[in-house]
Image: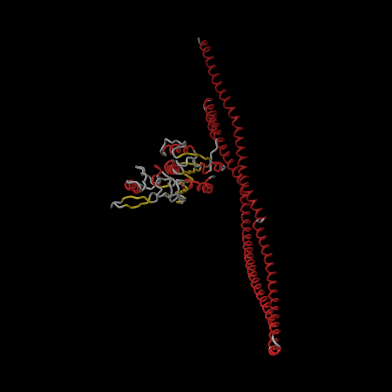
Amino acid sequence: MNSGIVHIETPKTALFADLVFACLFMCLLVMMPTLSVAAPNINSYDNQVAQLTKNLSADNAKIRAIEKSIATLDRKTLGLRKRLRKERTGSRTEINKAKRDIKRQTNEIQRLQIAIRLIEKDILLTARDTQRSKEYYKSLNPFKRQLEAGTHKDKIKQNKRNTAQMRVEKTTLTAESNAIKAERKSAEKQLLAIGKKQQNEDVDPKLQSILDQQKRKTKSIAKLRKTVRKNKSQLLALKSKRKHLLDQINLANSAPAPAAIRSNLQEPVSQQVASQTQPEFSSYVFAISGELASNIEDTLQLKSWVESYEATYIQAHWNGFEDNADNLSTDHFKQQFEERLSAIHPDANIILIGHGRGGGAAIEAATEVASKLNRAIEFLAVIDPIGDSNLRANIVYNNTSSQCVTPKSNSENDDRIINTEYAQCIKDAQRRKITSNIKHFYNRWQKDSEGPLDYHRQIAIIDNNGQNISVPTATGRFTTSSAIESDQKRVFVGEGKDAHIALLAQASKALPKLLLKHLR
């Protein structure tokens, strides 16, 4: 009986031992390939990280060397420009002096020529007087001729002396005139030579050579910086991949079962590595169009320029990221903006540009949505911003309870009552404050032409005494936090209903210079 019992339980024990051995063997089979494959991957990541770090160091060293070279060229350029300015100043002085000398010599020559002509005229008159005296003397009878002989001879002698003296004076004046003409000719040659010299100075070959070098080095440094940004992004992705792979290796080494190893190695790693391969842009530019200009990119022409700095350019409308004519508020845009902003890396630069209703939407997005998410706005630019009902008052003032109504023209009978409501709305409302999460604020508006419906600077109302008076409409200037770098200005564009478009065209010239330092 005992032998039977032993005979029955021995196979069970052996079977259990076989199962345990098989389990351990399968674990080793699963874990060992994983470790053997992962180790070379770690080494590969380490090699790539080391190579990228080396490339970054080399590129940064090249950038520093080029920057020093550019600084040296700048100093040389400054010195050359100073020298050229000094030479040009000297040339201009010489030119002005030569012109003055030529003018003085010309005037002197003209004076001498007039004097010579007067002497020639006097010589001619003296000769005529001598001839007439001789003819008169011959016509006298012998008795009178004898009486006037002495007077006649004296007059002839005096005329000869005067003629001789005038000829000597003429010769002197002629010689003096010729000498001045020679001086003038020399001065004209000198002026021509100075003019040619100045033309040569305007195109200085040495300065042009330095400027060409600066241009080449600037292009080179821009290319290097682009490479550095790309390598930094790759380095960040590689380090992240390496970290995730190490985490999975550690998880595999401590995992209790092969299933856990497979699930942790295959699905999360592939998903996380895939997500890490997607590059993060350093800047995001949102261009928000209004009602009157449904696509401000047609005027701004910023998309390709912004993308050349490896930034993302996103176009939107005041009522949403899709142009929806049925939506008459900015709520849908703010909701979509919040979703997009939440998906953007917190270190990215956020830039908002808005026009008209789009400007109002940009202000609400920055001061309400981004402020709520504790997200910084690097640069907020608004051009002629307006709020609900196309009124400036409904964006400059934070009218949460009720919106201001459109003021009417003076030709309407009930304008005083309606305009009184508008003025009272401004008086009761609180000013909207540009919050401190906005680093730079750029605001341009016009109060001279249509666009906002309260574009008139003065409107008529009736006061408490029943008298007609004029009061100002809402300004376009916002209250800003002291920490904000603010640039706000009213611009006179000129009368006409398309003044807001002209203002947008002006902004298209200014924005690239302003955006340059905010696109990293």
Reply above or below: 199 against 249.
below
Which residue of the protein is positioned furthest toward the top in this rendering?
1
Task: Determine which quarter of the picture holds residue 333.
Answer: top left
Res. 214 in view: yes
Percent across and percent down for residue 34 are 58, 28
Res. 382 in view: no
Percent across and percent down for residue 109 are 66, 71
Q: Nearer the viewer, residue 316 or 197?
A: 197
Percent across and percent down for residue 426 are 36, 48
Q: Nearer the viewer, residue 152 or 368?
A: 152
Viewed as shown, does residue 405 lie left or right of 185? left
Viewed as shown, does residue 70 lie left or right of 335? right
Reply above or below: 337 against 9.
below
Q: How many marks?
A: 0
Which residue of the protein is positioned furthest toward the front in this rendering?
141
User: What residue sits 52% from the left and 14% below the top?
Assistant: 9
Colour treatment of the image: secondary structure
Reply above or below: 422 against 126.
above
